Image (spheres, rainbow, N blue to C red):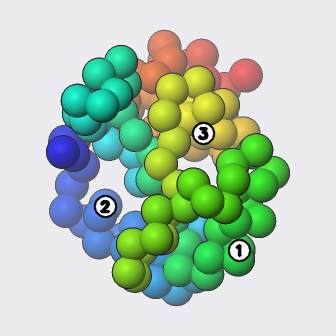
Amino acid sequence: MAFGIRRQELIEWKEKVKKGKIAFLTHYWYDERFPQYTTVTKVGCSDVEKLAAWGEKYGLRREWIHQRELFPHFDLLGEKQIMILQQEGLFDHLERFRLVSKGEGKR
């Protein structure tokens, strides 16, 4: 179950994914299988080859791609999520969802 995102953010993410761009969507999240995590970042792209190549540089396996009809994506959690958001320069995601202290994400 997702929390903390605006409808417009979801619409923009879906549009980017459909256009074959790598798109990031971070939101608060609860899943009883992973009670230790409170956020997830979905990294999507309709071009699965492009998404797989993007994921490979971060050690993400092709088989971890969630094959959703129009919105294939990786789910990023925990330390890997933080590291990738930092590497991608998405400091606003880190701060907004309190994954790091203000200013700490810009290492």
Name the residue: 25% across, 35% down: 31
Dot 3 alpha-carbon crowd within 10 angstroms: few under 14, some 14 to 19, many 20 or more: many
Element at label 1 = helix
Query: Whole-percent x and y of residue 94?
Result: 49, 31
Q: Identify the amino acid type marked 1.
A: Lys
Q: Amino acid at mark 2?
A: Glu
Q: Secondary structure at mark 2?
A: helix
| Disc ID at residue 9 | 2
Question: Which of the two residues, 88 or 56, is positioned nearer the viewer here?
Answer: 56
Relative placement, left or right, of 14 versus 103 is left
Disc 2 crowd rating (10 Å Cα; few below 14, some 14-19, many 20+) is few
In-image side of 5 versus 102 (left or right): left
Q: Identify the residue at image location x=38%, y=80%.
A: 69
Q: Position of residue 55 (x, y in %)?
A: 70, 55
Answer with mark 2 or mark 1, whichever residue precedes in sequence.
2
* Lower sequence index among marks 2 and 3: 2
Please tell me whether mark 3 sits on a helix, a strand or a loop.
Answer: helix
Looking at the picture, tell me which residue is in the foreground, 102 or 93: 93
Numbered label attached to residue 20 = none
Q: Is 73 located above or below residue 28 in the figure?
A: below
Which residue: 56% across, 35% down? 81
> Mark 1 or mark 3: which is in front?
1
Amino acid at pointer 3: Leu
Work out how far the residue at label 2 is from the one at label 1, CA to CA, in angstroms: 22 Å
Numbered label attached to residue 50: 1
Placement of 104 over or under 89, stated as above or below: above
Which residue sits furthest right?
A: 57
Q: CA distance from mark 1 to mark 3?
A: 18 Å
Q: Is residue 97 above or below residue 54?
A: above
The N terminus lies in quadrant? top left
Residue located beneath label 3 in the image? 85
Q: Residue at x 39, y 72 (%)?
A: 68
